[in-house]
Image: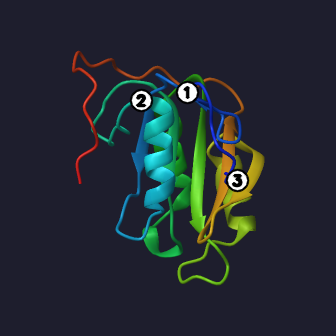
Amino acid sequence: MSTAGHAGGRSTDLCLTAEMMVQELGWDDDVDEDLRRRIEDILGGALVDDNFGERVDAVLLWWRSGDGDLTDELITARTALSGTGFVWLMTPKPARAEHVDPAEVIEAADLAGLHVTSRSDRRDWLGTRLTQSSPPAPRARSSSARQPARW
């Protein structure tokens, strides 16, 4: 998640392309709004929220040490993914309150059937890209149309 630009609706540093469906979990007023806008620009549309109900290409998960059980949340994120989908886990940097230890991220990812494939950082957040070790179990399809995330 470097500051490199994107061209033609593609961002190589985020592994996102135009028309991908990206679900956002863990949003709060402390998230990196510049990153969110950048992702929406790449996608050509809004991020979807946790009520979307269909498979997504990626999950953007904002996570802080006080948010609960990371393994449970990663399992939830994984069940939302398409077979080739991935998670961008965003955690506060070490100097910030509610920092998450990298060892906890690795352990939770492993227990959730995910693997760390790359890391990058923003001003206040560390990004960890997690990929699936095997495709997730089937998820019920919803007939609902794409709904933008509501805050």
Mark 1 Cα within 10 Å, few/some/many (few <14, many 20+)? Answer: some
Query: Measured from the top left, where is residue 118 in percent x and y?
Result: 77, 47
Q: Which mark is first along the chain, 3 or 1?
A: 3
State the CA–CA distance, disc 1 to disc 2.
8 Å
Element at label 2: loop
Compared with 92, 52 (above or below) is above
Query: Measured from the top left, where is residue 146 in percent x and y?
Result: 28, 25
Q: Residue at x 70, y 35 (%)?
A: 12
Q: Residue at x 23, y 47 (%)?
A: 150
Q: Which mark is first along the chain, 2 or 1?
A: 1
Find disc 3 in the rendering and name its residue: 2
State the CA–CA distance, disc 2 to disc 3.
20 Å
Q: Are marks 1 and 2 in contact (CB under 8 Å)?
A: yes
Mark 3 Cα within 10 Å, few/some/many (few <14, many 20+)? Answer: few
Q: Which mark is first along the chain, 3 or 2?
A: 3
In the image, 31: left or right of 142?
right
Q: How is the image coloured?
A: rainbow
Q: Quadrant of the C terminus?
A: bottom left
Query: Measured from the top left, where is residue 135 in percent x and y?
Result: 62, 23
Query: Measured from the top left, where is residue 44 in percent x and y?
Result: 42, 29
Q: Amino acid at mark 2?
A: Gly
Find disc 1 in the rendering and name its residue: 9
Element at label 3: loop
Q: Amino acid at mark 1?
A: Gly
Find disc 2 in the rendering and name its residue: 44
Compared with 7, 37 (above or below) is below
